[in-house]
Amino acid sequence: MSAPSSPAVEKPRMTHRQVLEALSGLLLGMFVSMLASTVVSTSLPVIIHDLDGNQTAFTWVVTATLLTTAISTPIWGKLADLTNRKLLYQLAIAIFVLATAAAGFSQNPETLIAFRAVQGIGAGGLAALSQVLMADIISPRERGRYMGLFGAVMAVATIGGPLLGGVITDAWGWRWNFFVALPIAIIALILVQQTLHIPPRPKKKTTIDYLGIVLLSTAVSLLLIWVTLAGDSFEWWSLTTVLMVGGALLGAVLFVIVELRSREPLVPLSLFRNRTFTLSVIASIATGIAMFGASVFLSQYMQLARGATPTEAGFMTIPMIAGLLVASIGVGALITRTGRWKGFLILGAVFLIAGSTLLSTIHYDTDFTLVSIYMFLLGAGVGMTMQNLVLVVQNTTKPTEIGVASSGVTFFRSLGGTIGVSVMGAALASRVTELVAERKDDIVSALMSLGAEAQKWQDQLQSGALPQVSTMPHALRIVFEDIYATGISHSFLIAVPFAVLSLIAIVFLPNKALTTMTTTERLRAGEADLATVSVPAGMDSVTATADDDAPSAGPRRSAGAE
């Protein structure tokens, strides 16, 4: 009589159509967050020029978002394990888009950096929660093909965003780039409310590790500020360096101590006992550096080293996005079909190494066909590794820790990207300063050839603001294109050792088969296993002296296991 009750307990799995409907809001939310970021990427050199910002300001406009994204990601992940995930996702969309719109009213680099920092808080929620919500409704084995959809959305936003941003900047001005995502965000919020239905979770008492948040923010911020300012505002070896680096190290040590003692730690250090999680974190750092570093500095390369307009720069970065799109969708489908993932991750890491190494060789006059191939390789490497590293972690993590484990990988990827962009930006600024000093005679000769316009361009160069190379006279433009191309290619060298480290970490990842159960099903299975083990174990303790009756008890235990 027990068999008929089983279907009522086990909820039938969602059909492909139901999954697509449930994902529609998540996909649009991811699209609007990516669009709001990428639509600004090609116009950022113009924005910083108009706001009288320098290379440091340019780097911090990007770094501020990445920093708050990294710090907020584990917070969102922890909240996802404790409270309503759907509501959290909608809140993240609202924070992200409102901060993006507010950034459009900035009158100086400092205001823009502040709003971009708030924008990163929402971005951290979208990055962490989309993965957690997907795990609620799709098993790791099936997730490959749907990961391809996320890859496609990312690719469309990353291709369309720079193009749209370039057109808007050239036609109506860069401020409109910050407003374009608002109507799409409203539609995303409505779609999430209407289509995303996830099983209710048991209510828990929510506690937030505020001290951990403060210590982590302090340690990371001090490190990034030191990397950005050292060698410019103060010497690399100085008292300021000792205080900032020492403060960062002290903050990191105190953070670890607090996490070990906290009841609800921001980043549970017990996760690092899981070999898959630890190695995936190491590999994710290189992916973050490649992804964020490329998106920031390739846009600068196109405009400052090849004299492209924002619209042209959007078109010129298409090969990298094409690589990401093809790899993400194609590999996702192959993982679902075959159940094998490790070979694709290894190939992705090899592509990361090849792309980063080759991009470190580019000059202002490098054949663009070659630059396109280099960008495609880097994009393919990111597409093969980024989402799939989260996938393999979710496959081995306890279902009760899916949120914090998923956000943990995303956190370290963002942190890697944040530090990587800061270091690459500092290296670029330092190298450009050196090259300007080395090419001083060439710059003076170019200025002297300009006649009446010489003073105007000399004043602009001495202001310290990021130059708009595409508007320079030809003689001056050639010199600065060469300077920036050399500086940007030099900064890509920094990504190479991290890409090699990523490959080593992936090689040692345990090659565990992907489960076909969703997170919700794994939770139910765990509860069922507990009940199945507990009841017979209790009965055994009662009937331990009645071994002669065991034959009749055996079938009942077997039936219970079914």
Image (cartoon, rainbow, N blue to C red):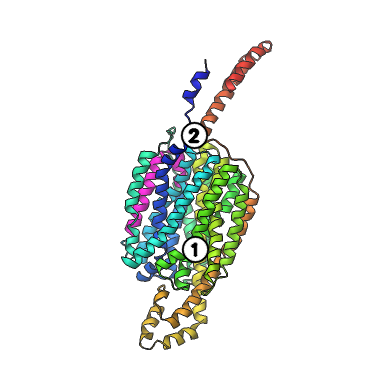
Q: Residue at x 55, y 56 (%)?
A: 380
- Check disc 2 and report its element: helix, strand or loop: helix
Q: Is residue 383 magenta?
A: no
Residue 170, by quadrant, is: bottom left
Residue pointed to by mark 2 = 520
The magenta span reads 74-103
Q: Nearer the viewer, residue 487 or 173?
A: 173
The tag on residue 13 is none
Q: Is residue 559 left or right of residue 205?
A: right
Q: Is residue 363 above or below residue 159?
A: below
Q: Is residue 97 magenta?
A: yes
Q: Is residue 140 above or below residue 162?
A: above
x, y percentage for residue 46?
38, 69
- Check disc 1 and report its element: helix, strand or loop: helix
Main secondary-structure element of the magenta-colored stretch: helix
Q: How many marks?
A: 2
Answer whether labels 1 and 2 touch (C-beta < 8 Å): no
Q: Residues within 10 Å of mark 1 (few under 14, many from 20)?
A: many
Residue pointed to by mark 1 = 422
Q: Residues within 10 Å of mark 2 (few under 14, many from 20)?
A: many
x, y percentage for residue 237?
55, 70
Q: Residue furthest right?
A: 548
x, y percentage for residue 263?
49, 40
x, y percentage for residue 176?
32, 61
Three-letter amino acid code of the residue under disc 2:
Thr
